[in-house]
Amino acid sequence: MILRSKEMNQKVGVINPDLIYPGQTLTFLFQDGAEISLVVEKNDNQWVIVRDKLSNLVVEHGPIVNFPPVVEVTQSEKKISFGWWWMILVFLVLALMFWLMFRTLKKVNVDPITAGPAQVPGGVNDASAYSRMREVIQSQFPGVNFVIKNIQRGLLSGLADVFYKGLQKPKKINLRKVLAYAGEILVNGKEQTIYFLQGCGNDARVGDYMSGGNLVFIPDVLINENGLESPLPTEIPVVAPAENPPVVTITDPGSEFHQQATSALTIVGKFLEGNDAKHKVTLKVTRDSVEAIIENKFDQTKK
């Protein structure tokens, strides 16, 4: 019986069960799970303990059984175990981050038309684009003074907040060339742009409501208030002025040189009037002279 509790009693200094001393504590594990400790008294020995102190306990709790072996962990084993726990912890953190990232990407890359209840079941067409634009403005800003300058139909891209019917919060969705309308409006005299999706009529934005920062809209056609399409206005390219524009000097029409030049050009013009032949005319103009050379280049009268 003492030997079965040897390993447990070693923890309190009983190295040799044959050598026990008064004041020492011996602990025994019984079959029913009870752990009972006895203090060694004067004149105790193994036989006395078994006969007088354990026999009655065996009847009550069953025979004594072995304690689970006590495994001593060395410092190196502790370090290895600690290292493995760190590796497991890092793996779990990375797995959690990957799962959250995957979940976020899955949520933002859904189809925006079917991701929630549509504001306009069946979507918006060109004929109803202006009325839908008015509804969006009035629902978000009742009583505001506004003017719709124009509405364009095209493709909308970017990470946007899309508002769905009946939902208090918008859904963050990555729009990828989604067919949409863009309205340029004046709100209390301030220019703004409003976007809504063609397939569901849901308005989309980034930041403040009347803005579309970081959204990319590629217009296709201009929508008139009567629902008819018009081509987009062609922008006239603006040519930047040259750094050193040429200086053009206008000759005084009353000067002698100007009169001579005008006379020479008049003579050439009269010569060419009614002439059946084709001529090559070369004019050489300098600051103080005018030279006119007429060559009979293609004479149609000669065969």
Image (cartoon, helix red, strand yellow):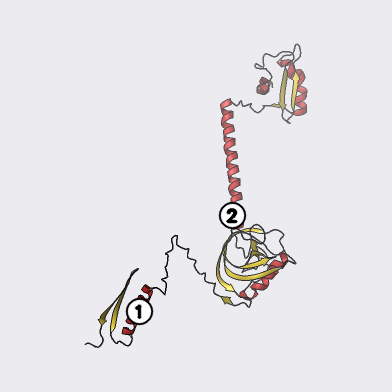
Q: Residue at x 58, y 52 (%)?
A: 102
Where 29 sits versus 92, above or below?
A: above
Residue 263 point in image, percent of width and height: 35, 79
- The total of numbered circles placed on residues is 2
Seen from the viewer's position, the closer of residues 45 and 279 is: 279
| Quadrant of the image occupied by residue 224 | bottom right
Q: Residue at x 59, y 50 (%)?
A: 101
Residue 105 point in image, percent of width and height: 59, 54
Residue receiving disc 1? 263
For label 2, the SS is helix
Seen from the viewer's position, the closer of residues 184 and 79 is: 184
For label 1, the SS is helix
Is residue 120 at all visible to an observer of this figure? no
How far apart in space, not on screen, are marks 2 and 1 (Cα)? 82 Å
Q: Answer with left or right where residue 258 lies relative to residue 68.
A: left
Q: Amino acid at mark 1?
A: Ser
Residue 48 point in image, percent of width and height: 74, 15
Is residue 140 at all visible to an observer of this figure? yes
Q: Amino acid at mark 2?
A: Leu
Seen from the viewer's position, the closer of residues 225 and 35 is: 225
Foreground disc of the pair 2, 1 = 1
Residue receiving disc 2? 105
Residue 21 point in image, percent of width and height: 71, 13
Near mark 2 (Cα within 10 A), the count class, few <14, some 14-19 or many ≥20, is: few
Where, quadrant-wise, is the C terminus in this rendering? bottom left
Circles 2 and 1 in contact, beta carbons < 8 Å: no
Q: Residue at x 56, y 31 (%)?
A: 80
Where, quadrant-wise, is the N terminus in this rendering? top right
Query: Which residue lies most toward the top here?
Result: 43
Where 272 sits versus 55, above or below?
A: below
